[in-house]
Image: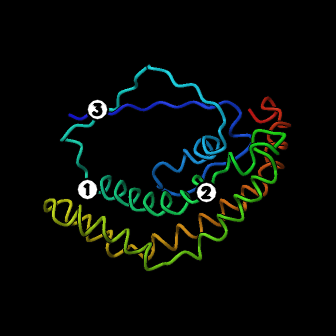
């Protein structure tokens, strides 16, 4: 049994930036947190541990296939979006911004995301194929089958990611209006 730790909470960050609406993309729910960290937004860390337990008996082929597809999508997301997180956002906007995450920052981020589709498909597909070739195929018979699936779908994974990145950029552009509308919804009217 393996144990890992994980727990995160944010305050009002969701009002500034939406996370990537990526189907089965691991860690895409950290987008707003990663941007805020790159902007130097203070964060408080605690020592409380939350344990996720993983047992050997949990191998269910369809679940593992979906998980490794999520890893493949994460590798594309992380490698492309890292250019945003590593763009010295705090230095770039630190002295000029009047809000934690201002409109010029979100505009800049949305434009960068729109341009991610122009990154080399060959490099992106090969990165995904490397996961299959170097980790999954040689591991054992069960993971070999998952590796073959990842090899066959690498192009589709990149295509889907491109659509999701464009949707994310569009969502970022429209996010302020969406948040205003959401705040004006009377929940008692829809319950």
- Secondary structure under tag 2 reads helix
Which residue is tagged 1? 61
Please, which colouring scheme is shown?
A: rainbow
At 39% across and 73% down in the image, what residue appears? 154
Which residue is tagged 3? 3
Q: Is residue 25 above or below residue 55?
A: below
Contact flag, marks 2 and 3 (Cβ < 8 Å): no
Upstream in the sequence, badge 1 or badge 2?
1
Q: In which quarter of the image is residue 34?
A: top right
Q: Is residue 18 left or right of residue 80?
A: right
The percent position of residue 39, horizontal first and vertical second, equals 66, 43
Q: In this view, does 129 lie to the left or right of 171?
A: left
Q: Is residue 116 left or right of residue 189?
A: left
The percent position of residue 99, horizontal first and vertical second, equals 81, 39
Question: How far apart in space, not on screen, are marks 2 and 3 (Cα)?
Answer: 31 Å
The percent position of residue 66, horizontal first and vertical second, equals 37, 57
Q: Quadrant of residue 124?
A: bottom left
The circle on residue 84 is 2
């Amino acid at each position: 049994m393996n144990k890992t730790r994980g727990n995160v909470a944010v305050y009002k960050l969701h009002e500034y930036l939406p996370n990537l609406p990526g189907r089965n993309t691991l860690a895409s729910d950290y987008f707003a947190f990663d941007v805020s960290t790159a902007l130097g937004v203070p964060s408080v860390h605690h020592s409380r541990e939350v344990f996720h337990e993983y047992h050997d008996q949990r191998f269910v082929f369809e679940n593992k296939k979906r998980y490794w597809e999520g890893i493949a999508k994460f590798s594309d997301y992380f490698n492309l979006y890292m250019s945003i997180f590593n763009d010295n956002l705090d230095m770039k906007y630190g002295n000029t911004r009047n809000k934690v995450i201002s409109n010029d920052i979100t505009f800049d981020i949305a434009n960068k995301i729109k341009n991610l589709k122009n990154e080399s498909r060959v490099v992106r597909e090969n990165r995904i194929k490397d996961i299959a070739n170097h980790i999954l195929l040689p591991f054992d018979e069960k993971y070999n089958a998952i590796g073959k699936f990842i090899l066959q779908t690498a192009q589709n994974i990149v295509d889907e990611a491109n659509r999701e990145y464009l949707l994310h950029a569009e969502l970022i552009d429209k996010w302020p209006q969406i948040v205003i509308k959401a705040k004006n919804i009377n929940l008692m009217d829809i319950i």
